[in-house]
Amino acid sequence: MAEDRTNLQWAKLATAIRTAREARGLTQPQLAELAGVSEGSVQNLESGKPRSRMPQTLAKIEPHLGWATGSGPTVLAGGEPTLVTESSSASTVRRTDEVLRRKLPLRVVDELESDDPLIDSQVIQLPGTGGARMTIVVHGRPDATPAEIQEALLAWRRTERKLHRLPDDVDVSDEPPAAHSS
């Protein structure tokens, strides 16, 4: 006989999820993205409405709330979630991500976080600047075939060679020389 899940503490679970999410500074869409679930799934869990079956979404969001595996069902049964302490390396990665998000334009962060295949990256010193440099990250299309990735790599290599051949004495002035007045 199946367990009757309608008598579980769905409202308590909803409050616990919302509290943990907000404590981590996450919005519902952000939690959904981290867990790989729909925003609607997170909204449903936070609604507190009783359900006839255990949502699969619950296990997927637990680690992103700082909960140990199985904490959701524990809360439903009247208990408290088991909190997981973040490893120092995970904490460092999170802080680094936050710094990058503050320092870089959103479109650059979006590209860096994309799942598109990474072809290459390079840091190139800008000639004649005393140390200024540019950082380049080359991604392929997500649906690219191996042949298209190879083609993109070759195109990048041609471009990279040109970038490295920039002369040291480039006249960076965009203004034409002044005309001599008589």
Image: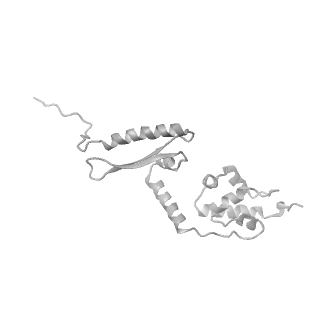
Rendered view: 51 above or below 111: below
**Residue at point 16% right, 31% down?**
179
Question: How many marks overall?
Answer: 0
On-image quarter of the N terminus: bottom right
Which residue appears farthest toward the right when viewing the image?
1
Residue 46 visible here: no
Q: Position of residue 124 (x, y in %)?
A: 35, 48
Compare residues 30 and 62 and report the one nearer the observer.
62
**Residue at point 56% right, 42% down?**
142
**Residue at point 56% right, 68% down?**
87
Which residue appears farthest toward the left when viewing the image?
182
Q: Position of residue 20 (x, y in %)?
A: 64, 64
Res. 12 image quadrant: bottom right
Q: How is the image coloured?
A: one colour
Q: Position of residue 157 (x, y in %)?
A: 40, 41
**Residue at point 61% right, 61% down?**
22
Compare residues 116 and 107 and report the one nearer the observer.
116
Residue 33 visible here: yes
Q: Position of residue 59 (x, y in %)?
A: 70, 60
